Image (cartoon, grey):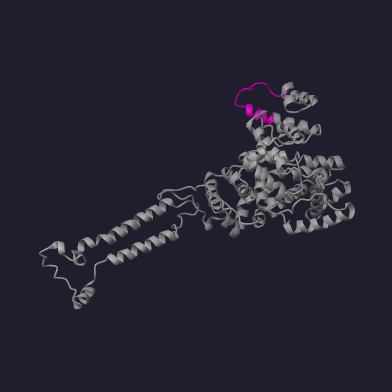
Amino acid sequence: HSKSSTESGISHPLATHFCLLCASLPQEGMASKHTLPRLAISQLMLSRAFASLGISDRPCPLLHRLEEVPLEVLRQRESKWLDMLNNWDKWMAKKHKKIRLRCQKGIPPSLRGRAWQYLSGGKVKLQQNPGKFDELDMSPGDPKWLDVIERDLHRQFPFHEMFVSRGGHGQQDLFRVLKAYTLYRPEEGYCQAQAPIAAVLLMHMPAEQAFWCLVQICEKYLPGYYSEKLEAIQLDGEILFSLLQKVSPVAHKHLSRQKIDPLLYMTEWFMCAFARTLPWSSVLRVWDMFFCEGVKIIFRVGLVLLKHALGSPEKLKACQGQYETIEQLRSLSPKIMQEAFLVQEVVELPVTERQIEREHLIQLRRWQETRGELQCCSPPRLHGAKAIMEAEPGPRPILQPSPSIRLPPDAPFPSSKGKPKPPKQSQKEKEQWKQAKASAQLDKPPTPSQANVAAAAGDACPPQDVPLKNPAHQDPAHQDPAPQDSAPQDSAHHRSQDSVHHHSQESLTSQESEDTYL
């Protein structure tokens, strides 16, 4: 027990308390198939022990499993996302609303990491800076940041298999990503809230891709959040509190009466993008929408939690003071954080980018009147994937898509609405078909009317029923017409082969008639 408590950074009284909790569990079947549920119960009891001692609670992935999606639905979504990712710039330019709807439904787990890279612009940053991460990775780094990063590694998702062991590949990659960022932005250095962000990214992509996604989050989505004086997060706290007055006047009035500063409950929510607050399935769904729509999603999630935790007189009966109110926000009801409920509430909440920017200007003026100018020189915040793409300076590099799935011509199409539409011919195939048709017309034997015209001109050939004495000197234009019919047949044969080839090379694409919520 002492070794476990030392490795996890838990103080001795807490370790003793946890040992007593575990000892109170039934001892039979410890090594049986019930070990995993018992471990989940132990983690739940440890979580409650953390809360009783005033230590920040951590969501346990074992207690919150992903909602199951039917296999057929999952395959259809994967097919649509493959089509989008392989034609990303076109979809972003013309069908961004469709991307947003599909992000709200949830990105398929098999493509989530790749989709996050495309949505955040991390893929473009990687292509614009080849070898940059390797260069930063091989640099020594600043010792003052390296020591802090080293102490934080084992605190990130300690129950996840990637980060459970000291010196494991997960902790090594996490160290590399965080160290590289301190070298990439030495004026910012390292903030502890960046560690869970980087850890979630590493669960879905390699270290280099995770680094560039972290750069995009810190520079485009949440600029200034991780600066030394946390001025940006203080401004957003005031924005959140002002928006709460419109969303839930009851909760706003209670927090005002208790004089509870927004930083006391929203700092970890916003700086960690709810990675340490929500169940794991809800974290992934929130991040899917966050990468697509930007910080608006973070504000909406915070407002939904405040509204349902403090938005009714019945719930406020147990919140008579500051301490009880903070505990209410720390111990949120599982129903509020449940994936389907939370996502639906977030999607329907009427809070827009325009409202957030208007409140930002109001709070910025108040800040300047009372505290002076901001010392944080962070770039302007960009609201989501489309804004990031439009703000990209200069010509964008062409994204190299991965090979799409190929199907044989007789393979069933994964559709819930019957037979698929016939495949469309490409421009190249149309040109080849026209050339073959023109060649067949040139090789076709003359009609009787054409032969009469030629005879009148003096170029008529001998009757075909009278054989020539020397077939070698026969005019090739007037040979036996039977072999000449092979040209159209060969052309038709080639067209048939082209059609088969076209069907075999047709990739999975998204049908617009199926772009509805499944």
Residue 211: x and y in percent read 66, 42
Q: Is residue 224 magenta?
A: no
Residue 275 visible within the image: no
**Residue 466 location, quadrant:** bottom left
Q: Of residues 338 and 444, which is closer to you in this image? A: 444
Magenta segment's dominant SS is loop
- Residues in magenta, as a range: 24-41
Of residues 31 and 83, the one drawn nearer to the viewer in this rendering: 83
- Going by the picture, which residue comes out furthest to the bottom? 456
Residue 184 in the image: above or below residue 31: below
- Residue 301 spot, x, y in % from top left: 73, 48
Residue 63 in the figure: left or right of residue 48: left
Query: To which quarter of the image does residue 60 belong?
Result: top right
Q: Is residue 471 above or below residue 335?
A: below
Residue 315 point in image, percent of width and height: 80, 45
Residue 233 in the image: above or below residue 452: above
The residue located at (45%, 52%) in the rendering is 506
Residue 128 lies, in percent from the top left, at 62, 49
Is 347 above or below relative to 40? below
User: Which residue corresponds to the image point at 68% horizontal and 37% vertical from the top-left?
Assistant: 139
